[in-house]
Image (cartoon, helix red, strand yellow):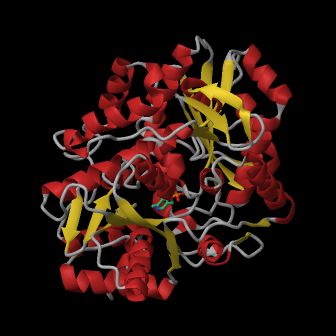
């Protein structure tokens, strides 16, 4: 399997090169040269999560070797996750795929647990001897999931920048208390866009890269445009489908719909890949919060990022430029790289572009307001005793809108992307309970309401020492990094 850039067919690389490079040199994203087929689904039925993951990763990254992949998967999906890895909570036509049972209680764990192992294997396959520095700009969830994923991985360092005062208290504590000798966290005096711009600047600085290379370091990225993050996310859609067959909710071969709460378009794109690989998915429902740039795009064909970013109770979806959409444009235009290139240069110039040819695609899109999110958290809690986090509730709200519009009662998988404990205040507020000011009291209150234990990753935060207290200016991000990674330090 080869990979090439969404902006140029001739920019072709192998799987390990695509993983190490992260983004193509022309600014495009790496896409697989074809969609491998799952084949007869019957033969997947007996597989556990790990076995299925090894099978699917093998279809894309086979070059790394069967044993290497199996080993990566076994180390990723071990007792960091609960038994079964992705529990499926099914009721009536709806099935929640619970993707938040990893260390950081959000779905980013699914891919970021395995990416470090894929990266190391790729470096080895390419005989690259340098130590790697993974740079991450985060609005909260990615930072901690990457820190945990790369924690104490030999030969890899991880540096995370987040906006000072711009992440939730739980997210801040999760990052600040990270252990390990290879982790580095710095708050910046700016917003998420500043952090992202600063990181991009570092990547573009050839001088800096050379200086780091002289010291034996190579820069790499763990954000969601890396193909090594996309592929592991295909696994749970296939797994969820097979679980539904096992539960007797659907017959093997029967089609289902999927709803995904969306920001950077990575998670829903993985569901689309699953469909193209032969998983019987009928409609892919793209769920937006008040930042409805994607919903407007699917409605009108115009992508328009010229609007004010709204801060919502689903912060991991507060995004205006949805990077992975570029891959979808490539696939639905049958690989028309010049059309993709044009659209992307318009996006860079004007923050907007027009796209024709969306109508025949399997996507529907809806947006959920803050009030609707609260309303559906309350409804589902009252009717079923099931508690959704605000991101999952965005998806559920959009599902309700879709059903109302179409009367389509097909069995539907909803990607449940975060633990409600991560957003306890919004949840308590929604179900009309007292909302304590103090974060941990609020988490404890929710535990009582739900009558379950607080996930370990969150309960232990209270006792952990805050190790990472660095704050820097937007213009000092590079200096802080070179200082940390000077050999004679
Ligand atoms: C990142 C994230 C999303 C959005 O996923 P994308 O792949 O960026 O579309 C949704 N929910 C949660 C909890 C997240 O952390």
Determine which quarter of the picture holds residue 349. Answer: bottom right
Q: Is residue 284 left or right of residue 460?
A: right
Q: In the rendered view, would you say 48 is above or below 436?
A: above
Residue displayed at 60% across by 33% down: 3
- The image shows residue 20 at horizontal and vertical percentages of 60, 28
Q: Nearer the viewer, residue 279 or 174?
A: 279
- The image shows residue 263, relative to residue 126, as above or below, that is below
The count of marks equals 0
**Which quarter of the figure has residue 36?**
top left
Q: Quadrant of the C terminus?
A: top right
Whether residue 86 can be seen here: no
Residue located 55% across and 27% down the image: 15
Q: Nearer the viewer, residue 300 or 146?
A: 300
Locate residue 169, reporting x and y percent: 49, 62
Q: Is residue 372 above or below residue 135?
A: below
Q: Nearer the viewer, residue 203 or 436?
A: 203
Q: Of 397 and 299, which appears nearest the observer?
A: 299
Q: Is residue 270 visible to the viewer in this orientation of the structure?
A: yes
Residue 108 drawn at (x, y percent)? 45, 50
Tell me where residue 232 appears, x and y as whole percent.
Answer: 42, 41
């Amino acid at each position: 399997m080869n990979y090439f850039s969404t902006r140029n067919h001739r920019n072709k690389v192998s799987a390990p090169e695509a993983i190490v490079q992260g983004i193509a040199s022309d600014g495009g994203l790496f896409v697989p040269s074809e969609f491998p087929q799952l084949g007869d689904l019957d033969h997947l039925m007996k597989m556990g999560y790990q076995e299925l993951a090894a099978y699917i990763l093998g279809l894309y990254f086979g070059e790394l070797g069967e044993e290497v992949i199996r080993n990566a998967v076994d180390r990723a999906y071990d007792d960091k996750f609960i038994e079964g890895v992705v529990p499926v909570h099914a009721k009536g036509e709806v099935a929640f795929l619970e993707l938040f049972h990893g260390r950081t209680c959000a779905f980013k764990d699914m891919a970021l647990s395995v990416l470090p192992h894929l990266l190391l294997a790729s470096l080895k396959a390419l005989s690259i001897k340098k130590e790697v520095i993974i740079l991450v700009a985060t609005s909260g969830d990615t930072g901690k999931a990457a820190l945990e994923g790369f924690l104490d991985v030999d030969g890899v360092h991880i540096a995370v920048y987040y906006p000072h005062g711009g992440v939730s208290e739980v997210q801040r504590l999760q990052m600040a208390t990270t252990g390990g000798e290879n982790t580095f966290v710095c708050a910046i005096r700016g917003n998420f866009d500043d952090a992202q711009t600063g990181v991009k600047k570092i990547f573009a600085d050839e001088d800096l890269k050379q200086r780091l290379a002289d010291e034996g370091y190579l820069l790499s990225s763990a954000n969601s445009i890396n193909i090594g993050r996309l592929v592991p996310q295909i696994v749970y859609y296939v797994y969820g489908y097979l679980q539904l067959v096992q539960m007797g909710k659907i017959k093997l071969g029967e089609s289902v719909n999927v709803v995904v709460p969306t920001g950077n378009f990575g998670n829903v794109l993985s569901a689309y890949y699953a469909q193209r690989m032969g998983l019987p998915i009928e409609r892919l429902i793209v769920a937006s919060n008040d930042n409805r740039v994607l919903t407007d795009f699917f409605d009108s064909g115009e992508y328009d990022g010229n609007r004010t970013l709204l801060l919502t109770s689903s912060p991991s979806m507060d995004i205006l430029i949805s990077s992975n959409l570029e891959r979808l444009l490539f696939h639905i235009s049958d690989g028309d790289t010049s059309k993709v290139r044009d659209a992307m240069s318009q996006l860079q110039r004007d923050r907007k572009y027009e796209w024709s040819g969306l109508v025949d695609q399997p996507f529907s899109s809806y947006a959920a307001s803050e009030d609707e999110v609260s309303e559906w958290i309350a409804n589902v809690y009252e009717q079923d005793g099931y508690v959704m986090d605000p991101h999952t509730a965005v998806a559920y709200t959009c599902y309700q809108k879709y059903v109302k519009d179409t009367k389509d009662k097909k069995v539907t998988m909803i990607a449940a992307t975060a633990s409600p404990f991560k957003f306890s205040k919004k949840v308590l507020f929604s179900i009309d309970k007292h909302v304590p000011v103090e974060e941990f009291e609020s988490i404890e209150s929710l535990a009582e309401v739900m009558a379950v234990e607080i996930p370990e990753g969150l309960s232990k935060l209270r006792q952990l020492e805050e190790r990472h207290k660095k704050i820097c200016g937007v213009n000092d991000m590079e200096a802080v990094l070179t200082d940390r990674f000077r050999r004679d330090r």
